[in-house]
Image (spheres, helix red, strand yellow):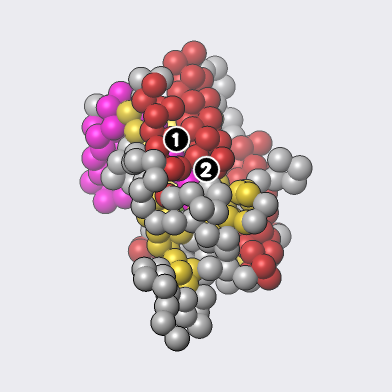
Amino acid sequence: MEQPQGLYLTVEGRHNGITIKSPQELKTMREAGRVTAAGRDAVVKAIQPGMKTRELDAIFAREIRRLGGKASFKGYRGFPATICVSINNEIVHGIPGDRVVKDGDVVSIDVGAIVGGFHGDSAVTLAVGKSSPEADRLIEATRLSLELGIKQAVAGNRVGDISYAVQTFAEAQGYGVVREYVGHGIGRALHEDPAVPNVGEKGKGPLLRVGMVIAIEPMLNLGTWETRVLGDDWTVVTADGSISAHFEHTVAITEHGPWVLTAIEGE
Ligand code: MG
Ligand code: MG
């Protein structure tokens, strides 16, 4: 039978290269999301000035193991740790180690866990100890930009609707929106199609359909959007040295609207 133009479904359950999860698979992804969220929140509760970033890594690893999850990031393309901890001018992919978290640091925690073969992926930024109004505003704007992006994650919309919502809100506050690093489809692989950029045009990009799962992850800089990578080949920092914030949720497109799989219970 002839397929409608520009659309194909295969036995693997894909739409234009984007995996479509069955209701049962979405339930498993919710479990992965729940474990990811529990690990994330254990780190957020524990963090305080004086802690080494490797202690945060250990807390997440222990919590997800207790809940039956496996770490998503460890060994992914050679990443040497369980979580990413990115501080102040670091945007993403900071490697935990002996660095000590100081009072007033802006700390981004990016975590992932696997349950039943599916990944959850989530990030949060917080100011540790005494923060500045400037940092608080950036963090809140980044969190809100994620919320606005999630609202656009509905069947019939396009990826560009999410990108547009994030970009217009963030730029109206005067923040730089990171372009070289983007959100992504997620499922049995940590990174699947489609790319979910944080800048873009309304009505452009891949169509969102029920059963797709995407990680939406705005990264906002106090200064410009440009980035560079440190000598460890992982840590991404702002080109101008300004502070940065990052929030991420794994979100399923359902017939009832967006389902935030990495939310904690009752969120
Ligand atoms: Mg992440
Ligand atoms: Mg991600």
Dot 2 amino acid type: Gln
Q: Amino acid at mark 1?
A: Ala
Q: Is residue 126 magenta?
A: no
Label 2 close to label 1 by CB (< 8 Å): yes
Which of 42 and 118 lies nearest the eye of the viewer?
118
Tell me the CA gap for discs 2 and 1: 8 Å
Q: Label 1, on which residue?
A: 165
Span highlighted in magenta in the image = 215-239
Badge 2 element: loop
Q: Is residue 25 above or below residue 82?
A: below
* Labels 2 and 1: the sequence-earlier one: 2
**Residue at screen point 67% across, 67% down:** 23
Measuring from the top left, give residue 231's x and y in whole percent. Answer: 23, 46
Q: Nearer the viewer, residue 4 or 156?
A: 4
The correct choice, above or below, for 266 with respect to 133 in the image is below
Residue sitting at x 69%, y 64% = 27
Q: Residue furthest top?
A: 133
Assign the N terminus to one quadrant of the image.
bottom left
Q: Is residue 140 visible?
A: yes
What quarter of the picture does the C terminus occupy? top right
Q: Residue at x 45, y 35 (%)?
A: 165
Number of residues whose C-alpha sits closer than 10 Å to that of mark 2, classed few (under 14), some (14–19) or many (20 or more): many
Q: Position of residue 154 (x, y in %)?
A: 55, 49
Report which quarter residue 167 is drawn in.
top left
Whether 105 is drawn above or below 51: the answer is above
Mark 2 lies on residue: 152
Residue 121, position in %: x, y?
53, 53
Q: Quadrant of residue 210?
A: bottom right
Along the line of sight, the residue nearer the viewer: 134 or 204: 204
Residue 82 percent across, percent down from the top left:
50, 55
Q: Residue at x 44, y 66 (%)?
A: 18
10 Å neighbourhood of mark 1: few (<14), some, or many (≥20)? many
